Amino acid sequence: MGDNLVWLYAGRALRSFGTAFLTVVFPLYLAAAGYRSAAIGGLLTVGGVATAALVLVVGLAGDRHGRRRMLLMLGVLGVLGGLLMGLSANVVAIAFASGLGGVGRGGGAGSGGSWGPVFPAEQPLVAASVDARQRTAAFGRISFVGVMAGALGSLVAYVPDALHASGWTWLHAYRLMFLLGALVSLAMLAVTLPLRETPPEPFTSPQQAAALSTRQLIGRLGLTNSLNGLGFGFLGPLLTYWFHVRYGVGPGALGVLYTVTNLVTALPYLGAARLAERLGVVRAVTVTRTVSVATLIVMAWMPTFALAGALYALRMAFNSLGMPARQSYAMGVADERRRGAVAALGSLPAQVTSTISPAIGGVLMESFLDTPLYGAALFMGANLVAYWYAFKDAPPPEEAHATGARGG
């Protein structure tokens, strides 16, 4: 199973590359088509509903029928979604297709692509490919790969600017990007084919008895992630629109910002395992998320695009320190046979709530432009408090084992 990591890394790289430029250009495409912020938020919600449904299907069906099969299915849907976005003039159909292609569902710049319908299949495969003590490091490395690929993808967001300068209409330039996204999904389909999957054995580790049951784990993840989803929904593509309106920047400047953000956040992913070893997984997540939330509030006060962009990059750098630990923790305490269900059902509330807040945020932006930042800070702050109290007394098996060994 160790060879699987190469192909999983390749798949993450391609997905992050495509998501990076599509997340930038999609809301700008809607704006170029004449839609205001409230309508843009509503259309993003349509795509989010499609994504949420796919998360549930992938997680539950993956445990039963194989995670590799789910990745193949998502590759096909990504190709179809990209073609529909590039060739159709029906904006509702385009919004639905965006959910199939994962547009705006990659977690944003610096996230390493760890979001959307792919991860309930991808995360169990990563966890099954390494030893438990290397799990956090593996999640850090795959996020590092995703960030570096996302940096390249963000630069592609400059292409519509170049095409427009040479005589293309904005709408045709953006649609070409959607067709490029379909090609990226086709490449993702190709790198999924070599994956091999072995059905998991029953999880009988003695540490499992002291950990959370599957039902408890899903319930606590669902609660904390629902708050995080509300916060993320206020960001996502709405943050792109906020930068555009607040500072008057276009896709080229935003592409540069997201490229820089990806580069800044790359190295912290590689240090995530060391931080988790030093502080413990749950404490590492809580500390890094606290700093991340604080920077969102300060961003709203920045007078220039450069300063706001610098704070955004700082926020994502701290976010990247805790993200691999959070992913590794959920897979570590879950029964291996139910990892897909835990990833899907634990995150489904986030997928649902993240489809609600874009519509709310889009309406509120009509009268209060900084809604995305303050809304995200409010709910992400509530998330980190809930996460600490939900999991501080339930360490992953490798930490519990190490503590027991020291105590003995």
Image (cartoon, grey):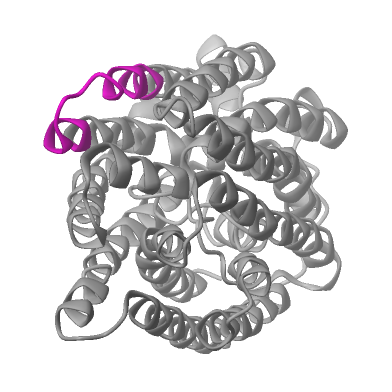
Residues drawn in magenta = 291-309
Nearer-the-camera pick, 221 or 372: 372
On the question of residue 145 being in view, the answer is yes
> In this picture, is 380 found above or below 17?
above
Could you tell me which residue is drawn at 65 percent across and 75 percent down?
74
Q: Quadrant of the C terminus?
A: top right
Residue 249 is left or right of residue 231, and the answer is left
On the question of residue 273 being in view, the answer is no
> In this picture, is 249 found above or below 228?
below
Could you tell me which residue is drawn at 62 percent across and 85 percent down?
80
Residue 398 on the magenta span: no
Residue 399 percent coordinates (x, y):
55, 26
Residue 57 percent coordinates (x, y):
81, 63
Q: Main secondary structure of the magenta part?
A: helix
Residue 209 is left or right of residue 399, and the answer is right
Q: Quadrant of residue 43?
A: bottom right
Residue 306 on the magenta span: yes
Callout count: 0
Residue 362 percent coordinates (x, y):
54, 39
Could you tell me which residue is drawn at 20 percent across and 23 percent down?
302
Q: Quadrant of the N terminus?
A: bottom right
Nearer-the-camera pick, 153 or 71: 153
Residue 72 is left or right of residue 181, and the answer is right
Residue 109 is left or right of residue 53, and the answer is left
Could you tell me which residue is drawn at 48 percent across and 42 percent down?
133
Residue 395 percent coordinates (x, y):
61, 23
